[in-house]
Amino acid sequence: MNRPYVSLSLDRREDYLARLAGCPQRTSDYSFANLWGWCEEYGLEWSFGDSHVWLRQTRPETIYWAPIGPWRDVDWSRCPTLAQGGTFTRVPEALAEIWAGAMPGRVHAEEAREHWDYVYSVPELVALSGNRFHKKKNLLSQFMKAYDYDYRPLSADCIEEVLQMQLEWCQWREAECDATLEAENRAIARVVKDWDRLPNLLGGAIRVEGRMIAYTVAEALDDSMLVIHFEKGHTAFKGVYQAVNQMFLDNLDREYAYVNREQDLGDEGLRKAKMSYNPVTFLKKFTVTVNPA
């Protein structure tokens, strides 16, 4: 039985993560830090059932997301929540296939290309070998030769520095700072301010002459994949994005096979940039409509 929908809270984080661990496929949208960072912008709410967590956003309109939990352990054809039908966004491919098999004739799935996660090989992005990465490697080399830089992992004592750099980043990019970037700025602040209460977070920062010029905020999705939520750099420093990307992955305390760099949200410039790093696969997502039983 599902409980009423309520706003997300940190005190149920571990309950949520336990359900997420049961998902056969984990995408960036459903990582806890992503939900927490964006919960005010989207008006995110959750409802804990006996086996799954149901999610919905209430801004700018009410839209249901995929349920989180052990998808294969449920007879979806008898699920009371789906009996009345409905439309769900950001549904991972694995769940869309499970639903289609469990409810033949009731499920229509449409690819949501703008929400596909870009997944890369960590060893490839560290080595940057071969012609495919020639431009990236060249920019990284230029950065390393041009600046007396210092790379270090992010920790709780860097929070104020990250917030200050983020404020400056918005000022540097003022001409481009539209409502989307302002919303992202609020999401970043929300996540880093709760750094100590989000134990799966990790990150790194580059400083030149003692000043932070780039940072990355990431989170482990599972044992083999981490997801990069936020990555910012001062573009006056040529190669800064290639540098923070490579140095963060090269200095991790443990090995991950893959890094998820989230979706492009249909932005052509962002899509081109993400494709330029040669993804090894995508985590596909769909908009799924379930007809009433």
Image (cartoon, helix red, strand yellow):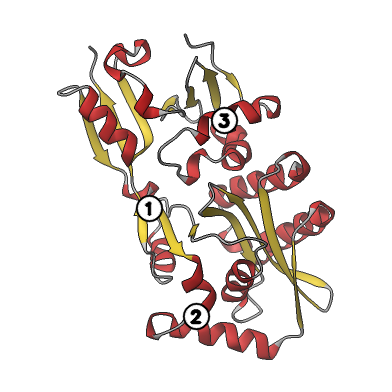
Name the image quarter holding residue 120: bottom left
Question: Is the residue 124 above or below the residue 63 in the image?
Answer: below
Amino acid marked by disc 3: Ala
Give the left or right position of residue 185, taking residue 26 as reference.
right
Give the left or right position of residue 30, taking residue 207 as reference.
left
The mark tally for this picture is 3
Counting other residues with Cα less than 10 Å from the Cα at mark 3, is it few (<14), some (14-19), or many (20 or more)? some
Q: Which residue is found at the position 44% from the left and 85% from the top?
A: 134
- Tell me the distance, in whole angstroms, between the alpha carbons under discs 2 and 1: 23 Å
Nearer-the-camera pick, 282 or 4 = 282
Q: Which residue is identified by label 2? A: 136
- Tell me the distance, in whole angstroms, between the alpha carbons under discs 3 and 1: 31 Å
Amino acid marked by disc 2: Lys
Q: Which residue is identified by label 3? A: 18
Labelled pair 3, 2 in contact (Cβ < 8 Å): no
- Tell me the distance, in whole angstroms, between the alpha carbons under discs 3 and 2: 38 Å
Estimate the x, y position of residue 27 in percent, counting from the top left.
45, 44
Nearer-the-camera pick, 125 or 206 = 125
Quadrant containing the C terminus is top left
Query: Farthest residue in the bottom direction?
Result: 145
